[in-house]
Image: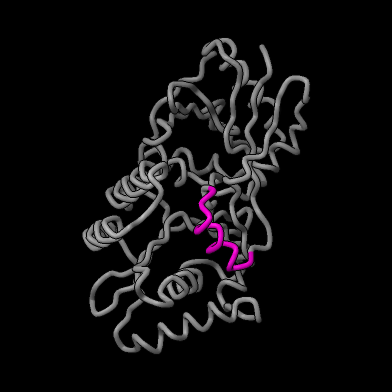
Amino acid sequence: MDLQFKPIEAKDIEELTPLFAQRPNKTCDSLFLDSFIWRDYYRIRYAISDEKAVQFLMEKDGYYFTAMPMCKEEDLPHYFQEIVDYFNQVLKQPLRIYLADEEAIKYLNLDPEKFEVTEQEDLKDYLYDANKLKTLSGKKLHKKKNHLNSFMKTYEGRYEYRRLCCSDRGDVWRFLDRWWDNKVIAAEFSEQLDYEVNGVHEILKNCSQLYIRMAGIYIDGELEAFTIGTYNELEKMAIIHIEKANPEIRGLYQFINQQFLLNEFPEDMVLVNREDDLGLEGLRKAKMSYYPIDFARKYEVVQKDF
C-alpha cells in the first residue's frame, strides 16, 4: 500500500478543500475545519490517494481508526476498499470507522456478514431550517425571539456585531480565558473541551490561511460572544463549529446565532448544522429548543474479521 499519512497543518487547506464536500454529506465533518480543530485530540493524519480522495488515520487510547474517505460518491466503493486493505495488510487489524455519514452508509450498503454498522446516537448533528434561524419566526421560536428582543432593548447603543479577523485574536483569547474559567462541565468532557479551546487557538494563529467565517459581539467595547463557521456549498449548509457567549447576558446567544447567519452566509442557504450534543443533557435541551428539522446521523463501522 502506498498511502503516505502525515499530520494536518493549516497550509494543507489549499490541497484538501477541493477534495472535501464532493458528495452528499450533511455532517460537520464534510469540511476541512472540523478535522483541523480536532487534529491533536484524535492525532489525525491524512493521505491523498490518486489526487481524488482523502484518507484518514486516527489514534485514540492506543488503537487506530479512520473516517469515511472524502471522494466522489461513485468512487466510494473503491476508496473504502483501499482503506480496508490498508488496515488489514499494513496495520494488521480490522477496519474501524467512526463518524461515518449516513449517505455513505446507504450508498455502500455494506455486507452485514463482513461489517457491523452501529449508529452513534449521541454524535448526530442537529440540522435546522436556515430561514427559521434567521427570522426566529413562528410560535415554537417565540421565546427565542423574546430573548433576542430583550438583548437588543437592554443593550441598545452599547453592542456591536463585528466580523472578526486575525488581528482580533487577542480579544478572542481573552474572552476564551474568561469563558473557560467560569465553565462548569462534567469531568469526562473537560479534556475534550480543552482540546476544542486549543483548536480555536490554532485557528486564530492560522486564520489567514483557513476558509472560515468568524464574528463577535462587543458590548461596551468588550468581546462577549464569538462564533466560527464554514459553508458547504454542495448542501447549501452553514456549519457552526464554535459558538461561545457570556451566559449571564440574556439573549446574547440568540443574537449572535441570528446575526452570524444573516451577515456571513448566502441568502439561498437552506440548512444550518449546529453539530452534536456529545450526549450532554443540557446541550441536548438547548439544541432541541431550536426545533431541528432533521439530524445528520453518524455510524461506527467495524470489520468483523479479516
Question: Is 84 left, or right, of 149 in this rendering?
Answer: right
Q: Residue at x 70, y 43 (%)?
A: 103
Q: Residue at x 44, y 23 (%)?
A: 5
Residue 35 percent location from the top left of the image: 46, 40
Quadrant for the N terminus in the image: top right
Q: Which residues are magenta?
A: 279-291
Q: Residue at x 37, y 66 (%)?
A: 245
Quadrant for the C terminus in the image: top right
- Front residue of this view, candidates 44 and 14: 44
- Front residue of this view, candidates 179 and 301: 179
User: Does the segment drawn in magenta span residue 59?
Assistant: no
Residue 186 percent location from the top left of the image: 41, 48
Looking at the image, can residue 171 be seen?
yes
Question: Is 163 left, or right, of 258 in this rendering?
Answer: left
Residue 84 percent location from the top left of the image: 62, 20
Q: Is residue 86 above or below residue 262?
A: above
Looking at the image, can residue 213 be seen?
no
